[in-house]
Amino acid sequence: MKRRSFLRSGVVAGLAGITSPAILAGWGPSPTASPASRPKGVPDPPLRLHHAENPRGLAPAAREAIVNALPGASQYGSSARAEVTRAIAESHAVDVEFIAIGNGSTDTLRQAPQAVGKPGMHLVAADPTYGDIFRYVQPLDARVTRVPLRADYSHDIPAMRRAVAQGGSPALVYICQPNNPTGTLTDPDEIDQWIEEADQENVYFVVDEAFHYYVDDPRYRSADRWVHRRPNVIVARTFSKIYALAGLRLGYGIAHPDTAERMRTLWAGGISHLTAVAALASMEDGDWVRDTMRLKDEAKAITQSVLDELGIEYIPTQTNFLMHRIKGELATHQERMRDHGVLVGRAFPPMEDYNRVGLGLPDSMEYYGQVLHRFRARDWI
Amino acid sequence: MKRRSFLRSGVVAGLAGITSPAILAGWGPSPTASPASRPKGVPDPPLRLHHAENPRGLAPAAREAIVNALPGASQYGSSARAEVTRAIAESHAVDVEFIAIGNGSTDTLRQAPQAVGKPGMHLVAADPTYGDIFRYVQPLDARVTRVPLRADYSHDIPAMRRAVAQGGSPALVYICQPNNPTGTLTDPDEIDQWIEEADQENVYFVVDEAFHYYVDDPRYRSADRWVHRRPNVIVARTFSKIYALAGLRLGYGIAHPDTAERMRTLWAGGISHLTAVAALASMEDGDWVRDTMRLKDEAKAITQSVLDELGIEYIPTQTNFLMHRIKGELATHQERMRDHGVLVGRAFPPMEDYNRVGLGLPDSMEYYGQVLHRFRARDWI
């Protein structure tokens, strides 16, 4: 499949409700307008569409749990920490021995190579993909092979397998599923087949499922099914996305007990008691999680419709962010968006002609669509 | 100095105000009493004197800061995290490049050997001392030499220097100042002289100053003065003690920028935004910190007076905990104390005939004194 044929760029009719007069009132900032001279109607503080955050903020139940937990926050030995570990284990139908808690899933990505890695090991990862793992293998003096995504932005599993076979062992394979920043899925059959056939002693897999809860594609399944049979598979998850705890730092790895134990040894600090109680309350509030999913679906539909209408190429997403084409420099686009009260993207080389936008609340994405229309009128996009 | 002559065991007259009838009312649990049958007057939940916590709980300003920060807790990129790092740096009169944040100072103790260590390195530490470092050097396959404390419970610096000289390089020296669990200071002149004369390339020092703010001894000075001139010195501090944030997990290392940078690379997760705002508020509330010091002084005086009165040997402390002699098994003592509504100590081998008790609020220590009197009446202590 060619990259362009995979991209959707047709005009979708029927987009409605994106021209609220209140939001449009007073528009017309110049590209050089300073924040102080921003016209009325431009969001201030700006909309945070530059990270893939949950735009709803903490669940009310999480806020309440935090306030109720303040009296015990000066104490060591949070019982909530053990409870949240148990709840996580139950959600994967495994014993707690399979879970290694971290301060965000980035901490899991740090623990993983330290737990299973060897000095001089070979890291094989996609290009582009989420970048943290490259930093965390530095202390191991790892050799790194980047394998370009395929035209459909999936991991090029055959090419990654060749890279591992040719690059010597031990190897660490990093798979971001769905991939950040492209939001795309890699066929789970391909991943499973590789894990099935790989040398368990010398090839380790870190499958980063940060966006697990946002995946629509029915082909998707978690790699957590491997942890019973394969000590060389580590799955990373986070509470920063669907559970809205990005500022509170909670992630975890799921792995065979032997592997998870080595990860736990490398984790020192413990999560905050307040993080633990907030995570528990968020997990228990199924309605709130379902509402978050529904709002994300709405936001995605609005955003993709505007892009279709304007004929702007984008990569259909399996996450709560989306990559679309821009004209000219990303930095210029970011600055113009900031002038219009929207924080967007960051550079994800080599995709320099794309912008990554997080899916905010439906209203925010309607506003974003209006800004895109305005940019088109100025031939900025 | 002989160990016994250093211990204070004389009876101090004039102890007053420790027999509140309200607290004493209803006493008389049997050693086998279950919690359900605890008589009236026994604290329930029990007094937490088993950790060296701040018994006051979070500062009111910290609680308020947390509640105010809830709306931003779902976001990445906490500005409070940068602010607290700056405030910490300022408190040591260094640039932020000298600071490596951790999730509690135990995280600093994890980062330190990973940042400066080499596989097979030699760890030299006191016996007994705080135990976390031994776990964190395991991934380095470190050889470990434990050097018994001197009779005055200070680090035996000459013997530790010999151990380093004989044990090969590189060496990591762990000094807990004041020492946990003994609460005792090691002469800073001895430490400074060693750092001054040590081979900077091959001998690394981790000086754990978790109890910095509780030290009374005028000889004491922090080892942070070395970080400008010596890349082989890392000082660990915590917000768990004087700032009462044990449940919120914040500690840090102070080190030469080259060393601190390597530690930062090994730290992944970021502290919770709520931890950062609570830390900032606590640091800014000087009155609250001074009140904590004053209450600790009162609690210490009450506790040491009771021990003097009962002729129970103890080690005068430079911290917010204290080691005193017990009769028989520590486990038995702990169980009896629990039956009386007090959680105490844990085993600190080889000091099996001592109990470590945290200094709670003055009222709590008066109650503790009453329990000790009762134990004496039963010949339990």
Image: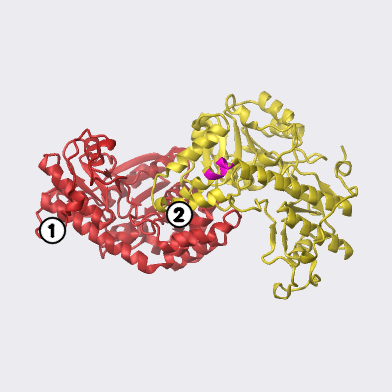
Chain colours: A yellow, B red
Q: Which residue is mark 1?
A: B15
- Could you tell me which residue is drawn at 45 percent across and 54 percent down? B250
| Crowd rating for badge 2 (residues with CA inside 10 Å; few <14, some 14–19, many 20+) | many
* Relative to B204, A143 lies left or right: right
Question: Do badges 1 and 2 share one subunit?
Answer: yes
Task: Mark 1 or mark 2: name the one nearer the start of the chain.
Answer: 1
Q: Which residue is mark 2?
A: B250
* Relative to A267, A120 lies left or right: right
**Viewer can see residue B71:** yes
Overall secondary structure of the magenta section: helix
What is the CA distance from the residue labelled 1 to the residue labelled 2?
38 Å
Q: From which residue to which does the magenta span run?
A: A281-285
Q: Is residue A286 above or below residue A272?
A: above
Q: The residue under label 2 is which amino acid type?
A: Leu
Q: Is residue A342 magenta?
A: no
Residues marked 1 and 2 touching at CB (< 8 Å) = no
Tell me the mark number nearer the camera, choosing from 1 and 2.
1
Place of residue A42 in the rendered image (x, y in percent of width and height, measured from the top left) = 74, 67
- Between A87 and B154, the one lying in front of the other is A87
**Viewer can see residue B277:** no
Place of residue A40 in the rendered image (x, y in percent of width and height, measured from the top left) = 74, 71
